Image (spheres, grey):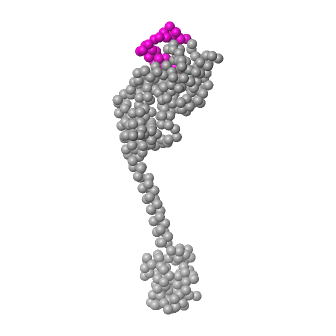
């Protein structure tokens, strides 16, 4: 029987100098982390730059790694911090949507519910989803992308993004509502 | 109220993986990092990992062992190379080290036992250097105040023992 080594153990092995452990970890997280950054950033070049910075930072700081949280939370927390750092350096600074006290739910734009195109299929619908994600406020988009790309719980997403669980949940709820409106779909049980 | 209830229900469904939005999102094509980026990251991971941690792995216990060995040996040496009489002699008669007869063996001077010291004094006495013998005996007494002279071996030195 082949045991799958946990992310945390791989990171500990890498901390001890095992580069193959790092390669396994990289293979596990390469795609989802890149996908998260790609959908979060407006530019592919920026996503690429942030992606590289995150991994290089992980390599540099590996000695400090301790299994106090899951590796997944750890690396996405680094990604979130790098993202915030990126926003901070932008002309407009950190987006207002990251303000916990911002009542973003009250700002819901009820325009374009797209009722006439409820049956849009295939590529068109995917393209609309892509565009709708890009239009979400950054904080709500990040919460949604973290959920989609990591499968982490609301509490873990809250931990990564440095907010309380209720705020994280509100951001996801807002993102969902906006995406449904944009796509004109309803989720039913 | 109903709308709020619906939204909460939809959120719960979504969080439990029952959502059309999720299914749609997973169909979105995902880009990949550039091959150059992969190469840079993997090269960095190898470059920094090889040197330091592998050395540290054996260096830490080795360093601890070396410190322990050094510490124990220094302690051992100090315990066996510094006899109490020597200290007593130095503190009791400061500044008189230069007057110690040159013919006395330097090693013996550093580490004399009581009998060895008395033998040297006896030699001075036998050679007629009674003043030097008396001076040395005074130093001897300061170092060994309770030492009982062996009358058979050092009976001649009793005259200095006042």
Of all residues shown, which one is farthest toward the top?
Answer: A116
The answer, for residue B41, to whether it is visible in the render is yes
The residue lying at 59 percent from left, 21 percent from top is: B8
Q: Quadrant of the N terminus of chain B?
A: top right
The residue lying at 58 percent from left, 24 percent from top is: A170
Above or below, B78 relative to A32: below
Above or below, B137 relative to A70: below
The residue lying at 61 percent from left, 21 percent from top is: A103
Quadrant position of residue A55? top left
**Left or right, A132 with reference to B47:** right
Q: Position of residue A153 (x, y in %)?
A: 53, 30
Q: Nearer the viewer, residue A49 or B135?
A: A49
Residues shaded magenta: A111-137
Above or below, B142 relative to A138: below
Q: Position of residue A70 (x, y in %)?
A: 50, 37
Q: Position of residue B38 (x, y in %)?
A: 37, 32
Q: Position of residue A63 (x, y in %)?
A: 46, 43
**Residue A56 included in the magenta stretch of the image:** no
Chief SS of the magenta region: helix
Above or below, B42 relative to B127: above
The answer, for residue B138, to whether it is visible in the render is no
The residue lying at 43 percent from left, 76 percent from top is: B107
Q: How many marks?
A: 0
**Residue A133 included in the magenta stretch of the image:** yes
Q: Quadrant of the C terminus of chain B?
A: bottom right
Q: Nearer the viewer, residue A87 or B22?
A: B22
Of all residues shown, which one is farthest toward the front?
Answer: A1
Q: Nearer the viewer, residue B140 or B16?
A: B16
């Amino acid at each position: 029987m082949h045991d799958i080594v946990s992310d945390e153990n791989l990171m500990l092995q890498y901390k001890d100098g095992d580069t193959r452990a790092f390669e396994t970890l990289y293979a596990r997280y390469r795609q989802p982390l890149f996908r998260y950054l790609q959908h979060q950033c407006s530019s592919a070049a920026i996503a690429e730059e942030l992606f590289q910075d995150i991994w290089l930072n992980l390599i540099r700081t590996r000695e400090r790694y301790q299994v106090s949280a899951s590796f997944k939370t750890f690396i996405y927390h680094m990604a979130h911090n790098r993202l915030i750092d990126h926003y901070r350096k932008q002309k407009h600074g950190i987006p207002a949507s990251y303000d916990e006290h911002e009542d973003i739910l009250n700002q819901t734009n009820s325009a374009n519910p797209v009722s006439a195109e409820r049956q849009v299929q295939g590529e068109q619908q995917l393209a609309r989803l892509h565009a709708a994600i890009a239009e979400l406020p950054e904080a709500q988009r990040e919460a949604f992308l973290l959920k989609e790309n990591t499968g982490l719980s609301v509490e873990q997403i809250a931990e990564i993004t440095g907010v309380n669980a209720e705020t994280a949940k509100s951001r996801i709820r807002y993102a969902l509502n906006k995406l449904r409106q944009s796509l004109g779909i309803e989720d039913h049980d | 109220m109903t709308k709020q209830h619906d939204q909460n229900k939809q959120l719960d469904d979504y969080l439990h993986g029952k959502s059309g939005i999720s299914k749609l999102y997973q169909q979105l094509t995902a880009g990949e990092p550039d091959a150059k980026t992969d190469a840079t990251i993997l090269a960095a991971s190898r470059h920094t990992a090889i040197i330091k941690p592998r050395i540290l792995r054996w260096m830490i216990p080795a360093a601890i062992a070396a410190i322990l060995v050094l510490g124990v040996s220094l302690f051992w040496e100090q315990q066996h190379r510094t006899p109490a009489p020597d200290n007593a002699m130095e503190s009791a008669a400061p500044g008189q080290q230069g007057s110690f007869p040159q013919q006395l063996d330097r090693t013996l001077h550093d580490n004399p036992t009581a009998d060895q010291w008395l033998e040297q004094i006896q030699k001075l006495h036998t050679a007629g250097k009674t003043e030097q013998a008396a001076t040395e005996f005074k130093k001897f007494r300061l170092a060994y105040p309770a030492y009982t002279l062996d009358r058979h071996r050092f009976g001649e030195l009793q005259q200095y023992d006042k």
